[in-house]
Image (cartoon, rainbow, N blue to C red):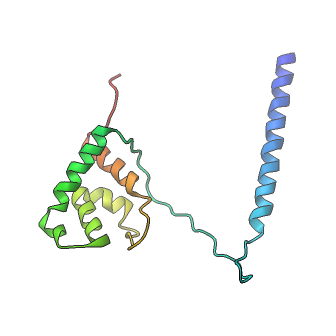
Amino acid sequence: MLLAIKKYKLILINLLIIATVQSIMTASSNEQEKGSDGRPLAKAATFHFPEYAYKETSKNEITYHDFEVNCEQHAACEALEGVKRKACVRRCISYSCYQDIYAFDELEEGEIDVRLNSFKGCVIQRSGNTNRRAT
């Protein structure tokens, strides 16, 4: 009985902490930051895309690198530069993964590619070269 009361108290304390943090976050998110000129700063947009798990193992890196090298030498991609070349190479590596991850919002020149690991994960999964332990 005493143990149950202690657990109950811990749960109440945790809920109180969570409620306090949420309250602080809500209050601070209502205050918009201002730039040096006094105008409100633009808020960062949340970017959603399909995410595929990717584990950076030497086997996965070698597999992806082999696909990439072969596609970089493909006649259709060789003459291209910048993001057009990247897009061509990635479509060559896996058209279906490219469609899932990049087609709805193409990579732009200078953009940091936050989707690359998801693309690699998709490629590895669809190529059947996943690093699974036998059970």
Q: Quadrant of the N terminus?
A: top right
User: Vertical placement of 31 versus 126: above or below?
Assistant: below
Residue 30: image location, x then y, percent: 77, 67
Residue 80: image location, x then y, percent: 21, 73
Count of marks, rendered view: 0
Seen in the image, is 33 located left or right of residue 84? right
Residue at 24%, 62% in the rendered image:
89
Q: Quadrant of the C terminus?
A: top left
Outermost residue, front side: 36
Residue at 32%, 24% in the rendered image:
134
User: Vertical placement of 13 versus 86: above or below?
Assistant: above
User: Vertical placement of 21 versus 13: above or below?
Assistant: below
132 vs 100, nearest the viewer: 132
Seen in the image, is 31 located left or right of residue 105? right
Residue at 27%, 60% in the rendered image:
90
> For residue 111, which quarter of the picture?
bottom left
> For residue 83, which quarter of the picture?
bottom left
User: Vertical placement of 122 versus 2: above or below?
Assistant: below
Outermost residue, left side: 75
Seen in the image, is 6 located left or right of residue 59? right
Residue 45: image location, x then y, percent: 57, 68
89 vs 134, nearest the viewer: 89
Residue 12: image location, x then y, percent: 84, 35
Residue at 39%, 52% in the rendered image:
117
